[in-house]
Structure formats: structure tokens, C-alpha cells
Image: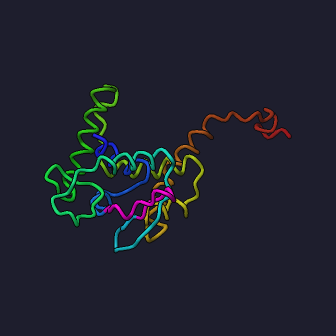
């Protein structure tokens, strides 16, 4: 179902929290500007520019949106009961997606995946692809940069692995103090 794919994609490729998916409204999606407004923790708004593929996915999702029971309902994601989707339903959608991944890719079995880990993967991918810490902070909606800094440990591990692969060509006499 396109709704479920859109939910998982927003967590994985825009870093949204489960609670932000639940609060996401039709008016938060700027189709012309290719971005979304996200109401995060503490009632703070942030804006996330989307790649064209995400905009297209959300446009398709919106065109196939279930009609809500209450015509004044503005939620982007509607449940099968024709109400705003719940946190538990978002988590269930993520769990079903992970189960399908495990079935398709058995080598992933045994890994612990969660909706929140998609957010962590989003942040880590940004850093691995050269985004600066301040940009990642803004995209995740972190109040304090120290919250975002937890993701840099992955980069530190990668740096250490890279450095362990270097074999300096230092003349033997320098190493033995015979300079």
C-alpha cells in the first residue's frame, strides 16, 4: 500500500519521528516547493526539502488517500478506520516492512530494526555523504547540537578503520633511531 511505503520512506529518507508522522497534515506538504513542514518536539516547526522521488511518492499517496470519516480531518495519513493514523499503527507498519525485508533478504535476519533506527540511519547517511553536523541538527529538529553529535561516533569508527589500513613507508633507519 502506497500509504505504508510513504510512511517508512519519510522515516528513512526525511528522518521523521513516529509522532511526527502521526501529526503530519495535508497542509504540511508543499508540493510546488518540494518540502514538508514538520511539527516536532516542543511544538517547534522545521522544514525539510525533499528529493523529487519523495515528492512524487507523497503526491501519489495523497491522490490515493482514504477519505476520512470526518470531512474536516486534515491528517495526511488516514487509518483503515478512516481516522488519523495512530502511533501504534505507524510502528506496526514499520514492523511489517522489516519483516518483509527479513523474508526477502534472509542475511538481515537477527538484526534489530525499529522505526527510530530509520531516523538514526538517515542521520548517519547524511554524515557519511558529507553533510555538516549543523545541517543534520536542523533536519532532525534537535534543539541542542550535542544530541546530534551522537551520530559522529560512526564517523570516528570509520576514520579509525581507514587509518588502520594505512601502511606508512617510513625508512627503517628512522624507525630504529639511526637518522
Looking at the figure, which quarter contains the N terminus? top left
Span of residues in magenta: 24-37
Percent across and percent down for residue 14 are 43, 53
Quadrant housing residue 29 = bottom left
Q: In the picture provided, is 132 more to the left or to the right than 112?
A: right
> Residue 120, position in %: x, y?
40, 51
Q: Picture coordinates of residue 11 (x, y %)?
A: 37, 51
Seen from the viewer's position, the closer of residues 11 and 142 is: 11
Identified at 72% across, 36% down, the residue is 168
Residue depicted at 39% across the width and 52% down the height: 119
- The quarter of the displayed image where residue 43 is located: bottom left
Query: Residue visible at 13% across and 52% down?
Result: 81
Q: Residue 48 versus residue 31: which sits nearer the camera?
A: 31
Please name whichever residue, 66 or 84, is drawn nearer the observer in this view of the structure.
66
Q: Is residue 68 magenta?
A: no
Q: Which residue is depicted at the point 45% across and 60% down?
A: 30
Amino acid at each position: 500500500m502506497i500509504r505504508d511505503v510513504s510512511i517508512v520512506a519519510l522515516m528513512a529518507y526525511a528522518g521523521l519521528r513516529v509522532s511526527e508522522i502521526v501529526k503530519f497534515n495535508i497542509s504540511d506538504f508543499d508540493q510546488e516547493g518540494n518540502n514538508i513542514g514538520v511539527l516536532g518536539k516542543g511544538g517547534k516547526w522545521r522544514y525539510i526539502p525533499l528529493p523529487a522521488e519523495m515528492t512524487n511518492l507523497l503526491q501519489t499517496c495523497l491522490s490515493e488517500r482514504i477519505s476520512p470519516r470526518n470531512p474536516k480531518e486534515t491528517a495526511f495519513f488516514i487509518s483503515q478506520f478512516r481516522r488519523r493514523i495512530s502511533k501504534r499503527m505507524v510502528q506496526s507498519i514499520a514492523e511489517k516492512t522489516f519483516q518483509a525485508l527479513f523474508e526477502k533478504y534472509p542475511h538481515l535476519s537477527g538484526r534489530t530494526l525499529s522505526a527510530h533506527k530509520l531516523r538514526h540511519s538517515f542521520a548517519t547517511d547524511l554524515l557519511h555523504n558529507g553533510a555538516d553536523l549543523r545541517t543534520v541538527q536542523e533536519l532532525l529538529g534537535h534543539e541542542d547540537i550535542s544530541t546530534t553529535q551522537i551520530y559522529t561516533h560512526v564517523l570516528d569508527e570509520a576514520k579509525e578503520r581507514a587509518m588502520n589500513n594505512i601502511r606508512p613507508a617510513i625508512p627503517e633507519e628512522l624507525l630504529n633511531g639511526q637518522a
